[in-house]
Image: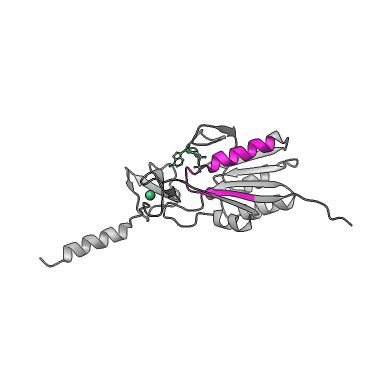
């Protein structure tokens, strides 16, 4: 007996901010639509930086409609029976439950396309993205250009008032006034507020 053919799989587009993840997600979604697949696109409601809630926009201004979600459960509940392709942008903001959700969607025979940054501003693994990389059939890690030196950028530099933000800050700054730059490993700067304090103390204690 021939086993029922099911085409489901998971593909993840990851990398630093400005590396073209949304552009690539949009490209894949558009091609799936040209192939007359039924597609649903989701995006964490935490990301309303570009194009606002309800759209996925790339930094070059292209956009498509997307359903805002606040949890993996939202994704699971909103996927329709006939949907063949499920795309999720800004996956780093979702909870760990997203791994089981996308695995189930792929098991049902759907193509799942996920985009998200794999490292937080400290350069540490970000939310569920590292685990998504582990379960994916296909991974593409994209790079941006370091705005300091022009080499390939692999790190998210958080800035507050134009200065490198300390490591002690929250991983997700809701409604924060911070900004981000793409930087290479060498130019990535994450000062520790604790180190600054220690330096100050040792300066004060230094005998004159
Ligand atoms: P991501 O989703 O990874 O944040 P986008 O797809 O939204 O990235 O945007 C990628 C686009 O951003 C690039 O094609 C380019 O036009 C623009 N861009 C702005 N700054 C940079 C940078 N430092 N390095 C590379 N591309 C950049
Ligand atoms: Zn650099």
**Which portion, as a residue range, is magenta?**
11-33
Image quadrant assignment for residue 56: top right
138 left or right of 147 in image: right
Residue 30 in the magenta stretch? The answer is yes
Q: How many labels were placed on the picture? A: 0
Q: Which residue is the extreme one toward the left?
A: 208
Spot occupied by residue 14 in the image (x, y as percentages of width and height)? 54, 49
Q: Nearer the viewer, residue 175 or 55?
A: 55
Is 203 colored magenta in this rendering?
Answer: no
- The N terminus: image quadrant: bottom right
Q: Quadrant of the C terminus?
A: bottom left
Q: Residue at x 36, y 45 (%)?
A: 148
Return the residue found at the far right.
Answer: 1
Choose between 162 and 182: the one closer to the eye: 182
Q: Which corner quadrant of the image does residue 97 belong to? A: bottom right
Tell me which residue sits at (72%, 42%) in the image: 84
| Frontmost residue, 39 versus 149 | 149
> Can residue 67 be spotted in the picture?
no
Where 81 falls versus 197 (above or below)?
A: above
Foreground residue among 147 and 93: 147
* Image coordinates for residue 203, horizontal then vertical, percent: 18, 62
Q: Classify residue 37 as left or right of residue 185.
A: right
């Amino acid at each position: 007996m021939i086993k029922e053919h099911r085409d489901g799989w998971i593909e993840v587009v990851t990398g630093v901010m400005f590396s073209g993840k949304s552009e690539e997600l949009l490209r894949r979604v558009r091609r799936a639509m040209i192939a007359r697949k039924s597609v649903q696109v989701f995006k964490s409601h935490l990301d309303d930086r570009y194009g606002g809630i309800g759209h996925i926009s790339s930094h070059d201004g292209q956009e498509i409609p997307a359903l805002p979600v606040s949890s993996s459960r939202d994704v699971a509940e909103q996927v329709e029976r006939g949907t063949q392709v499920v795309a999720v942008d800004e996956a780093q903001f979702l909870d760990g439950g997203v791994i089981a959700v996308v695995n189930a969607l792929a098991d049902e025979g759907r193509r799942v396309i996920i985009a998200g940054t794999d490292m937080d501003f400290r350069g540490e693994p970000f939310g569920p993205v590292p685990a998504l990389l582990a379960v994916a059939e296909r991974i593409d890690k994209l790079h941006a250009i370091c705005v300091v030196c022009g080499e390939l950028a692999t790190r998210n530099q958080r800035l507050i008032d134009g200065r490198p933000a300390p490591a002690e800050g929250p991983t997700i700054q809701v409604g924060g006034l911070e900004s981000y730059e793409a930087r290479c490993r060498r130019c990535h700067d994450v000062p520790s507020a604790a180190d600054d304090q220690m330096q100050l103390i040792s300066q004060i204690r230094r005998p004159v």
